[in-house]
Amino acid sequence: MLIADKFEFNDVPEAKAQLNFAPETYIVDSTIRSLQSGVSGSLHTASDMIEIGAALSDIGVRELIVNLSWKDGFTVAEGLAEKNLSARVVGTFRARHPMAETWAKDGIAAGCDEICFESANDADHFSRLADPVRESNRGVSHGFAEAYAYKEVVDIVRAGVALGCRSQSFHDSYFRFALTPEGAKAFYSALRRDVPDAPPLYIHLSNFYGNATMTAIASLAAGASAADVCMNGIGHHCGHIQMAEIVTALAALYGVDAGVKLDRLTEVSHLVRERTGFNGPLHSPVTGDNGFMIDGAYWAAEAHIPYEERIHAKFPIDPRAVGNVETVVWAPGTINTGSVRSKLGAMGIDNATVTDGSVEHIIFALEDLLRQRNTYPNWVTDREFEQLCRDVLRRGY
């Protein structure tokens, strides 16, 4: 369990009174479904998606969601089923499509553990579609991805209770892409109140405004059971809830364990990058190559202070806890003679033997190197900077 430094106001009664997490909070995963979408631009094969699904199951996601109506859907469902994973294989598609009954039947034949009907017309429609699946001893669930009046939502959720529905998921399209964290809390609290025996409620959000993670956490804090996420934030409408972000924030800031092996997040993130060609920003939180990066000048300014007392040259969690590493970089925009001398001292070089001219030459050499490269990112790694320092000193400047 990750525990970040606690800000005192996190624990005041007004803040804690807003938290009503379900007895169990967990993660379901739509990475495969999002890779199937053309918007992902992914270079994967069906075998790649199966391997990605197996890795996601291994780190603790509860369900792997596959769109059966999209390319390779049945092939991937079959491949995942053959692996006997701990995660359930959930086949999904639009309930209003004329092929819905056929897709459900074929999904069961492909080995899906559960069929999720997205956007049934009403409670009767959901019941008609669900009955053959239940007769095959497979689970059923439902997702709201169209516009509904709140009363219609309640009616379908109540119908699902009678059907033994395993979950009810709510998508951004149902929320009109306009859900605020405050609205999320009000919605999930109301649904828990109006259907107290409802099955687990899920939240599936796009990141159009950059608020998917915080709005999903607000939903969970109001009683939703699971976030429907994607590794590396893959998905349309600016991507979906980023797995690494939400599970780390839950653990570090709220003390909530979502059942995911945090120390393997970076490993699986890299697997998805490798198999899809989807790299994402270098500064992606938690699993990004630069996620735990410090400017050399910040590091130097606090190098003499115990790590736990630092402000800028530290991280809220240990990068090793999520399988990542700390990196220090050096760039002309922030470097100065003081930071160079701090670095030389950390390298075991006696600053008394180093002239001010030598330090200036180190700064000039760094500027010259980056001018010649003229590429992004415009910095050098800590290892490169150490070598540059030694080279300048060896030349006797």
Image (tube, grey):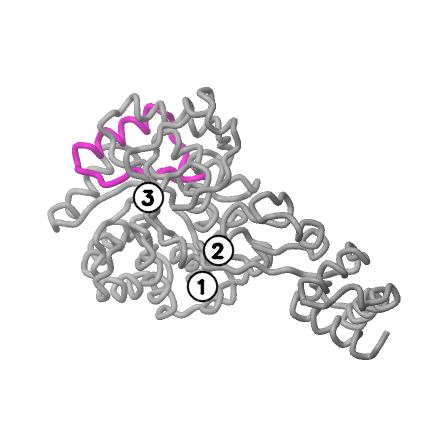
Give amino acid for label 2: Asn
The answer to which of 14 and 242 lies nearer the viewer is 14
**Disc 1 from disc 2: Cα separation:** 8 Å
Earlier along the polypeptide chain: callout 2 or callout 3? 3
Q: Is residue 292 left or right of residue 1?
A: right
**Disc 2 from disc 3: Cα separation:** 18 Å
Circles 1 and 3: CB atoms closer than 8 Å = no
Region in magenta: 144-173
How packed mark 3 is, by other alpha carbons closer than 10 Å (few <14, some 14-19, many 20 or more), is: many
The answer to which of 47 and 262 lies nearer the viewer is 262
How packed mark 1 is, by other alpha carbons closer than 10 Å (few <14, some 14-19, many 20 or more), is: many
Question: Residue at (46%, 38%) from the top-left corner?
Answer: 253
Which disc is residue 390 wearing?
none
Q: Is residue 172 magenta?
A: yes
Which disc is residue 26 wearing?
3
Give amino acid for label 1: Val
Question: Residue at (23%, 62%) from the top-left corner?
Answer: 81
Which disc is residue 272 wearing?
1
Give amino acid for label 3: Tyr
Name the residue beneath numbered marker 2. 232
* Local secondary structure at mark 2: helix
Observer able to see residue 244: yes
Circles 1 and 2: CB atoms closer than 8 Å = yes
* Local secondary structure at mark 1: helix
Rendered location of residue 300, percent (x, y): 70, 54
**Disc 1 from disc 3: Cα separation:** 21 Å
The answer to which of 282 and 84 lies nearer the viewer is 282
When asked about the image quadrant of residue 170, the answer is: top left
Rendered location of residue 243, percent (x, y): 43, 50
Q: In the rendered image, which quarter contains the C terminus? A: bottom right
